Amino acid sequence: TQLLEQSPQFLSIQEGENLTVYCNSSSVFSSLQWYRQEPGEGPVLLVTVVTGGEVKKLKRLTFQFGDARKDSSLHITAAQPGDTGLYLCAGGGATNKLIFGTGTLLAVQP
Amino acid sequence: SAVISQKPSRDICQRGTSLTIQCQVDSQVTMMFWYRQQPGQSLTLIATANQGSEATYESGFVIDKFPISRPNLTFSTLTVSNMSPEDSSIYLCSVTGRKETQYFGPGTRLLVL
């Protein structure tokens, strides 16, 4: 069974701080995606990484795919209250089904 | 990207009753997915719904409890049958996008009393 473990599970920080969320698995994925979900809404895609070692930046967010395509990280610089939400990584493969990570609930206090 | 709507957005139901959730997409898509999510937690895939064929259910989910219809390429329904308080959850539909990604509806928040 493919599993994606995220850490930390919960994170409460002050505005302006930096943070990193980790997504780890023993399985290899053809793609690794990150979603953010705000209360009352469905998950929204932030980024997709497909190449081992790939790094993508989205404003203050930096995403990295591990060299072996088994893990990923999300780094947020100078967090803002608008970054508050549930962050989910998801591994993709040939079946078009996604394996979702366990989730990281982030609260950024003003 | 696809725009997805769900009805109802939320409901409170009595145990033993059934609720049908609708998912409408603004474009034709081959694969649609139904998920269940406890607030603040990750998503659990219930089934994959393909037009013109029976839905494929994940382990722990059965058709008698969660019948799914997929009458065309833009619409699907999920019924939660004979509900119990344990069925209280958020139910989400999604469709496939580019590069294995998925686009999600806003979810249906169900509370069973």
Image: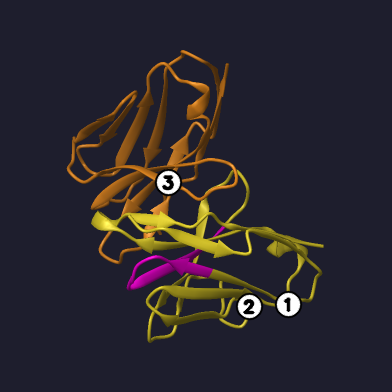
Check disc 3 and give the amino acid type: Val
- Dot 3, how many residues are within 10 Å of its Cα: few (below 14), some (14-19), or many (20+)? some
Whether residues under marks 2 and 1 lie with C-beta atoms below 8 angstroms apart, the answer is: yes
Task: Give the CA distance from mark 2 to mark 1.
Answer: 7 Å
Q: Magenta residues, as a range?
A: B23-36
Whether residues under marks 3 and 2 lie with C-beta atoms below 8 angstroms apart, the answer is: no
Residue B2 quadrant: bottom left
Q: Is residue A64 left or right of residue B63?
A: left
Question: Where A16 falls versus A39 (above or below)?
Answer: above
B59 and B24: which one is in front?
Answer: B24
Helix, strand or loop status at disc 2 = loop
Quadrant in the picture for the C terminus of chain A: top right
Helix, strand or loop status at disc 1 = loop
Check disc 1 and give the amino acid type: Asn
Rendered colour, chain B: yellow
Q: Tell me, yes or no, if residue A80 can be seen here.
A: yes
Q: Chain of mark 3?
A: A
Q: Which residue is mark 1?
A: B82
Q: Which residue is mark 2?
A: B65
**Going from the N terminus, do you reach mark 2 or mark 1 first?**
2
Residue B77 quadrant: bottom right
Task: Give the CA distance from mark 3 to mark 1.
Answer: 31 Å
Residue at screen point 42% across, 17% down: A18
- Dot 1, how many residues are within 10 Å of its Cα: few (below 14), some (14-19), or many (20+)? some
Residue at screen point 37% across, 40% down: A24
